[in-house]
Amino acid sequence: MTININIGASGQSYCALVGVGLLGQIPDLLDEYAPAYRYAVISDAQVSELYAEGVVSSCRSSGKNVELHSFRAGEASKTRENWSKLTDSLLGTGHGRDSCIIALGGGVTGDLAGFIAATFLRGIPLVQVPTTYLAMIDAAIGGKTGVDTHFGKNLVGAFHAPKCVIADPGVLSTLSIQERSTGLVEAFKHGAILDAEYYDQLCTGTDLLLSADPETAEAAVTASIRLKGQVVTKDELENGYRQILNFGHTIGHALEAASEYKLNHGSAVAAGMVLEAQLGELLGVTEIGTSQALYSDLKNLGIRIEAVSQLDPKAIMSFLGLDKKTRMGRSRYVLLRSIGEVEDSGGWSREVDESLVREVINDIR
């Protein structure tokens, strides 16, 4: 059964489709949701071998004009240089405004291919086909696209809503345990900021989620998409309420940058969630024990939060000043009241005294 979740966006809403086996239905889904004269599948080299070549073949068998454009896998490829190379590749093969880009892969692919779609000939249609937990429950939902620079993550980008999102939890079985573990961090974040009951369900179902049990995975992907979809429908361009989705990301992105992106996104955000909960506890905003609960539950998920203790605190602090959420040179943080509830007095994010931030970063477990 296909689950259809409607997500609001400027211009028109779009659907996130969730269901085991949807990857095999892409030609028909393109006809329904994103008809185009020509298609370009953008995928990294690993996913190209696993899925993209098959998708291209099935699309061609259905009579579609489609080519595959691939790039080296990994966060290090989410750059302006690769944006330029892939854009030139599309131009060189004659793509025009009647083309549609299919972003098939994880979060890096969705961000990079989405940014290409947003800027190619001032914007062409996009279909997101996420193949990881991270991409299904977070990166593919909400229309954010972008690339990294040496100054930090996602500092160059655009909002560009897809025509649809096609999430097939059946493909999660090909991921490594580490990829499943780190990708599920965003699901735990959704529960932490919005739904304590969902958070508890993730904790009790951790083993099944890590084994990519199809029924459990489909339920979690669906729940997270619904939660994030409700947020981005209310605030598509992150002018207010959508800021709550940044919980753990202000510090998390600084950790990634300080590691020169050797630290994966999920582990960095997990550490950021724990540290930002500690900030809230120090400020008297967050219920005491919340950071410890997050630490324990994320550790059970397989995240080694203590690994970030090897990073240089000065480097972390320097990247915090470059975060895209910074206002007037000051970083802003989303703080919890407790698991399932965000502190909202005075706005959805707030400045925190730099000395307190330095204190928790110097005290990383």
Image (cartoon, rainbow, N blue to C red):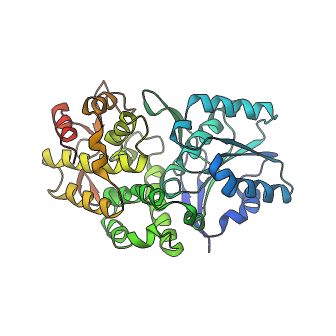
As rendered, which of 244 and 132 lies closer to the eye?
132
**Is 138 left or right of 252, judged from the image as shown?**
right
Q: How many marks?
A: 0
Furthest residue in direction top, as rendered: 328
Q: Residue at x 72, y 29 (%)?
A: 88
As rendered, which of 120 and 212 lies closer to the eye?
212
**Is 232 left or right of 169, judged from the image as shown?**
left
Q: Is residue 230 above or below residue 87?
A: below
Assign the N terminus to one quadrant of the image: bottom right
**Is 85 left or right of 279, judged from the image as shown?**
right
Q: Is residue 148 above or below residue 136?
A: above
As rendered, which of 47 and 343 lies closer to the eye?
47
Residue 273 in view of the camera: no
Image coordinates of residue 278 in percent, x first then y, are 19, 48
State the image quarter where residue 353 is shown.
top left
Q: Is residue 365 above or below residue 323?
A: below
Residue 272 in view of the camera: yes
Image coordinates of residue 59 in percent, x first then y, are 79, 56
Image coordinates of residue 97 in percent, x first then y, are 76, 36
Q: Residue at x 71, y 65 (%)?
A: 24
State the image quarter where residue 360 is shown.
top left
Q: Is residue 148 above or below residue 19?
A: above
Image coordinates of residue 310 in percent, x first then y, are 29, 40
As rendered, which of 203 and 53 lies closer to the eye?
53
**Is 205 left or right of 8, judged from the image as shown?**
left
